Amino acid sequence: MLRFLISLLIGLVVGVVIGLYLGWVQFPVEFVNSPASSLAQRYQDEYIVMIAAGYLKDGDLGGAVERLRVLGVANIPAYVQEVTERYISNSRNADDISVLVALAESLGRLTPIMLPYRTIAAPGAG
């Protein structure tokens, strides 16, 4: 029984050493600078929500638009409107919807479906 346990322990140690060598030396992870447009839709949407929240803090609409350009979208106001309406249609977080509505309104894309979520006054609006 002792011989079995020692063999098992040696096998585990050898396996861990080989695994670490292969993972860190032979086949390490290669980081590539991928464009933001290659993010999954979910993460692009979260990025837009973060930009909208930042816009509410600083009121810099030009800066928000510049930060959204990295997504590679041709018509940013229309895309923000689309994301906002998708969030509303899918009953997402009301706070996220409110900041998206404020950004969409500042971009001139306020639609009737957004009106109930217009609880936060957008900087420079109204």
Image (cartoon, rainbow, N blue to C red):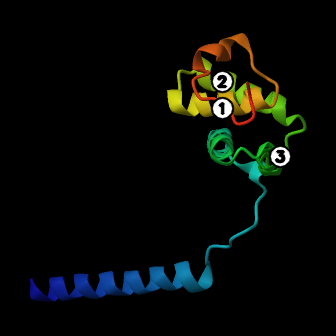
Q: Dot 2, how many residues are within 10 Å of its Cα: few (below 14), some (14-19), or many (20+)?
A: some
Against 109, residue 112 (above or below) is: above
| Tag in front: 2 or 3 | 3
Against 62, residue 75 (above or below) is: above
Residue 83, image x and y in percent?
A: 70, 29
Q: Is residue 64 left or right of residue 94?
A: right
Q: Earlier in the sequence, mark 1 or mark 2?
A: 2
Residue at the top extreme? 112
The disc label shown at residue 22, or none: none
CA–CA distance in space, label 1 to label 2:
11 Å
Q: Quadrant of the N terminus?
A: bottom left
The residue wearing badge 3 is 62
Kindly tell me whether residue 122 is visible in this rendering. Answer: yes
Q: Residue at x 77, y 31 (%)?
A: 106
Residue type at numbered disc 1: Leu
The residue wearing badge 1 is 100
Q: Residue at x 31, y 81 (%)?
A: 12
Residue 20, image x and y in percent?
A: 47, 82
Residue 71, image x and y in percent?
A: 79, 47
| Tag in front: 1 or 2 | 1
| Tag in front: 1 or 3 | 3
- SS under mark 3: helix
Q: Dot 3, how many residues are within 10 Å of its Cα: few (below 14), some (14-19), or many (20+)?
A: few
Residue type at numbered disc 3: Gly
- Residue closest to the eye, 35 or 114: 114
